[in-house]
Amino acid sequence: MAKVNKALFWSLFAAGGTLTAFLFPVLALIVLIAANGTPPEIMGFEQMKGLLGNWLGKLVAFGIVSLALWHAAHRLRTALHGLGLRADKLVSLVGYGIALLGTLLSAYYLLQI
Amino acid sequence: MAYVRPVSTTTWYLKDRNYFIHMVNELTSFFVGAFALILLWGIGAVAGGPEAYQSFLASLTGPGMRLFLWVTTIVIFYHAIAWFKVTPKAMPVQKGEEFVPGSLIAGGHYVVWVVLTLIVLFLAGVL
């Protein structure tokens, strides 16, 4: 991998780690509350539409979902290698494949809102 | 040929507490990825309209899904704390000759995290 790509890759990895560390706990908590039968105000359809209906909301949602997917895929790839699984090409294909698909899908969905 | 100490490629992380914790931390990423996919599912449901979104909300309340979200939420909190714990190592801050104490760097992250979490919970209508 070229040096420039490596720097870009690492900054995206770090951004993903930082974003998920700061925001995923509270987001998971909100979804968990909804799963227990009492969705918080923000989980209403109109509220979600308002939140994701503008460019700032779309950009934030896109960044969170895609960076988290890439971050998780990369860490799981190295962890599976650490567990002794030596099928790195297959693991990379599946992990980064899901991350790429999720990135494209989130952009597609967000553009429809 | 030089002697190479044999190291198991499948059980090395069981030999040392720090290696083991590292492996656990990395594996918690599975739940981060899974939750990102749940968020993606929700975004897709919003794009699909009110009915699709209602059925997404209903799917969350199924017993299997609820259990999975309990586990996911707990693991994601652990994952976040593990990330903040290593921030002093990942980004040491030097001030003059001295390094800023690691507890201050990690502590700063915890404070920002708690404040941010409370703000989001307030804006979301939970608090």
Image (cartoon, coloured by chain):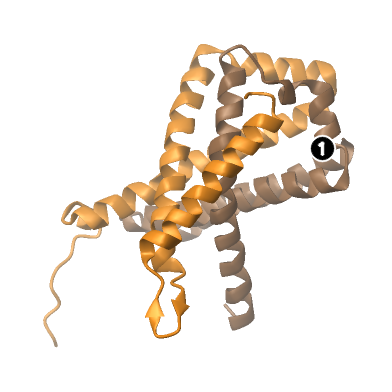
Chain colours: A brown, B orange
Tell me which residue sits at (79%, 29%) in the image: A48
Residue B20 lies, with reference to residue A3, above or below; the image says above
| Residue occupying image coordinates x 67% and y 52% | A100
Residue at 43% across, 72% down:
B92
| Residue B118: % across, % down | 59, 36
Q: Quadrant of the C terminus of chain A?
A: top right
Q: Nearer the viewer, residue A66 or A47?
A: A47
Give the residue at mark 1: A52
Above or below A59: residue B64: above
Helix or strand or loop: what does disc 1 sit on?
helix
Relative depth, front residue between B103 and B59: B103
Query: What's the amino acid at mark 1?
Result: Leu
* Pointer 1 local density, CA inside 10 Å: few below 14, some 14–19, many at least 20: many
All told, the count of numbered labels is 1
Residue at 53 percent of width and 38 percent of height: A25
Q: Is residue B78 left or right of residue A70?
A: left
